[in-house]
Amino acid sequence: MKPTIKPINISFRVFSPQDVDAVLVIEQLAYKTPWRRVQFIQSLSNPNILAYLILKDNRIVGYSIALHTLDFTDLLNICIHPQYQHQGLGAQLFNHLLNVSNIKEVFIEVRVTNYNALLFYKKLGFKVINIRKKYYLDGEDAKMLHFSISS
Ligand SMILES: CC(C)(COP(=O)(O)OP(=O)(O)OC[C@H]1O[C@@H](n2cnc3c(N)ncnc32)[C@H](O)[C@@H]1OP(=O)(O)O)[C@@H](O)C(=O)NCCC(=O)NCCS
């Protein structure tokens, strides 16, 4: 009998308030200074927010939250469960966001020491456009990155 190859069962859906509990578990595993529940709830209630989940075998393994206005899109949070990082899921989630929206340009702030994320964004085509000194509450600087669909 031939061995069965398990399909990589990836799907996407809209991130809604009832998903916050599952997302908080991932957020707390992935970040030194995680968002709190109230930040997710407030974001999801904003009509200008585009928020999506990525699921593997029907389990939530990551999420993205973007603030989308006429003038700009700010990627506020993108996160993949640590056990599923570096398997291409973050890139798939970002591409999903582009595919289901009319986003042309994206901005994001990244901690200067978040080396994996900086590599990730570089690979997606983001360019560093500015440094924001002491951007975070703990005093760390941020790199401001920009992505344009045409670049
Ligand atoms: C940043 C993040 C969303 C990337 O998602 P991901 O699924 O791990 O990324 P992908 O697998 O799509 O990786 C694509 C590229 O990112 C970089 N990368 C991602 N994880 C990496 C790691 N652990 N080590 C080195 N490079 C890494 C690499 O350049 C990789 O390309 P490669 O596979 O050719 O080496 C994820 O690492 C994460 O959730 N980190 C914690 C939360 C966070 O910091 N979010 C960003 C806030 S600004």
Image (tube, rainbow, N blue to C red):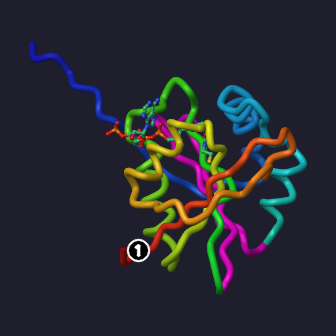
Q: Quadrant of the N terminus?
A: top left
Report which residue position mark 1 lands on.
149
**Residue at the top extreme, as displayed:** 1
| Position in image of residue 5 (x %, y %) | 22, 25
| Position in image of residue 137 (x %, y %) | 87, 44
Q: Nearer the viewer, residue 65 or 3?
A: 65
Residue under the image location 68 percent in, 51 percent down: 142
Q: Quadrant of the C terminus?
A: bottom left
**Residue at the right extreme, as displayed:** 38
In terms of image quadrants, where is residue 24? Answer: top right
Residue under the image location 78 percent in, 60 percent down: 44
Q: Which residues are magenta?
A: 47-70
In terms of image quadrants, where is residue 70? Answer: bottom right
User: Relative to 80, is 26 on the left or the right?
Assistant: right
**Residue at the bottom extreme, as displayed:** 70
Q: Is residue 151 magenta?
A: no
